[in-house]
Image (tube, helix red, strand yellow):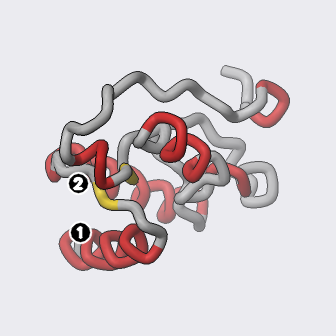
């Protein structure tokens, strides 16, 4: 899929949730490249900021948008990887803290 088209699709999706894509387009494009690479590698768009099992069922919680995204955005204004953000986050109306990893240890592959 063409990167710009993928951007447009995710931008519409984000807006449907009341989110936005991060205003740092370069960072967003880097994440989108990772999502598309994971789709080629695993057959699904696993979060490029996390380790994966390579098993759709085991990775279900981190298929973008991950199941932790809404809670991260509600609490920190950004999802873990910074792809999806709140409008206030993009407008610098909130402090930008590092989003902690919410994925439980038992769901993470070991290195």
Q: Which one is nearer the viewer's eye here, 11 or 29?
A: 11
- Identified at 25% across, 38% down, the residue is 93
Helix, strand or loop under label 2: helix
Q: Earlier in the sequence, mark 2 or mark 1?
A: 1
Q: Which one is nearer the viewer's eye here, 8 or 18?
A: 18
Image location of residue 58, percent across then percent down: 79, 50
- Identified at 33% across, 49% down, the residue is 31
Q: Which residue is mark 2?
A: 29
Q: Is residue 45 above or below residue 2?
A: above
Q: How many marks?
A: 2
Find residue 3 and name its label: 1
User: Is there a contact, CB below 8 Å, between mark 2 and mark 1?
Assistant: yes
- Identified at 37% across, 51% down, the residue is 86
Q: Which one is nearer the viewer's eye here, 87 or 47?
A: 87
Q: Residue furthest right?
A: 106
Quarter holding the N terminus is bottom left
Residue 11 figure quarter = bottom left
Q: Residue furthest front?
A: 93
Q: Is residue 102 above or below residue 39?
A: above
Q: Is residue 95 above or below residue 82?
A: above
Helix, strand or loop under label 1: helix
Marks 2 and 1 sit apart, C-alpha to C-alpha, by: 7 Å
């Amino acid at each position: 899929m063409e990167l710009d088209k993928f951007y447009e699709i995710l931008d519409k999706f984000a807006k449907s949730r009341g989110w936005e894509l991060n205003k740092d387009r370069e960072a967003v494009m880097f994440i989108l490249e990772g999502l598309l690479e994971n789709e080629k590698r695993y057959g699904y768009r696993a979060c490029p900021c996390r380790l994966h099992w390579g098993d759709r069922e085991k990775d279900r919680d981190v298929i973008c948008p991950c199941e932790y995204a809404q809670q991260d955005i509600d609490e920190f204004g950004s999802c873990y990887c910074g792809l999806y953000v709140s409008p206030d986050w993009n407008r610098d109306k909130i402090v930008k803290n590092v989003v902690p990893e919410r994925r439980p240890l038992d769901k993470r592959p070991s290195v």
